[in-house]
Image (cartoon, rainbow, N blue to C red):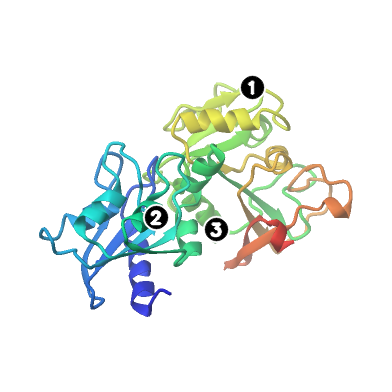
Amino acid sequence: MASTVEHDAMRRALTIARRGPRGVNPQVGALLLSPDGDVIAEGWHRGAGTPHAEVDALSRLAPGAARGATAIVTLEPCNHTGRTGPCSEALIAAGVARVVYAIADPGDHSSGGGTRLRAAGVEVEAGLLADEATALLDSWLTVQRLRRPHVTVKWAQSLDGRAAASDGTSTWITGPQARADVHRRRAEADAIVAGTGTVLADDPALTARADDGSLLPHQPVPVVVGARAVPEAARVRQHPHAFLQYPGDEASGGLRALLEDLRTRGVQRVFVEGGPAVAASFLRERLADELLVYVAPVLLGGDRLAVQDIGVTTIGEARRLAVASVTPLGDDLLFVAHPASEGDE
């Protein structure tokens, strides 16, 4: 059973893990505790080709100084040789007596570090603050487990579930705080997806912008789904990144192939906010890992629904969601939800 000291150390490890870059490799943090529970070293992964968090922490100690120590790691120590050697072997060689990690490594080739450590006589405990570590690594874990990017589907709606008024106008349903939150989240994504219907009707820039309208440092790659031509004057053509277009019916089909192609391009986080048809397509295909729904206290009526048909014909087929949080943003509310597991329904 993990001690209070180990709980505190894991929280610290999760904090320093965020110092590393988000990308193909996971953000991982590690602490080394003396037998008395004092922190004697800490480390984090700084990107592909650099030492992993455990090795980074060990490198800060004199030879032999880690003997009898406890290693606190946010991800199971790897058990394979890639650009760097196995962390499990490095911990064994250093004489570490106990390893506590948050979540197991799902990799086909890198997993098994816990088993290797136990075989060498190291005490191992798994699962400490697993939920927090899973939240940190959600996109990386999705790529590892499902072989596709992590998908967030976002929409804004009135209280009665409309995305626009009857005449098609939708600027603005939500207030400035909600819009600023959207742009912050766009900047965290690798790609942003919209359908050609939205591109033609609303002419979105698909950029991540600050309150003053300037571009944020990181911009997601714009992706347009649909066969209709994007006009030469479309704002998406002025995006810092050249847009990718995937032909086909924007309301159905081809999404898995699209996500697979984006994965091969290094995309781990996809932000979908391209209109009711595209949102429905991802939901219908069960490709949404996270939903962001911004609800404004207004009524619009009419038939401009925020989400189109998702394949539900009877109440027994309803897609149940697990609500992670509800956050006030000015007069609006942001619901963050995930598809419910069978145990949540």
Residue 235 % position (x, y): 53, 32
Q: Which of the pair 93/10 is nearer the observer?
A: 93
Q: Quadrant of the N terminus?
A: bottom left
Which residue position holds label 3? 176
Residue under the point 48% across and 63% down:
130
Residue 97 % position (x, y): 27, 65
In the image, 301: left or right of 80? right
Query: Where 25 falls versus 321 (above or below)?
Result: above
Quarter of the rendering containing residue 344: bottom right
Q: In terms of secondary structure, where does tag 1 sit?
A: loop
Q: In terms of secondary structure, where does tag 3 sit?
A: helix
Residue 10 % position (x, y): 37, 67
In the image, 228: left or right of 243? right
Which residue position holds label 1? 247
Task: Tell me which amino acid carries mark 2.
Answer: Gly
Task: Tell me which amino acid carries mark 1.
Answer: Pro
Pointer 1 local density, CA inside 10 Å: few below 14, some 14–19, many at least 20? some
For marks 2 and 3 on the same chain, the one whose residue lies earlier in the sequence: 2
For marks 1 and 3 on the same chain, the one whose residue lies earlier in the sequence: 3
Which residue position holds label 2? 114
In the image, 129: left or right of 113? right
Res 188 seen here: yes
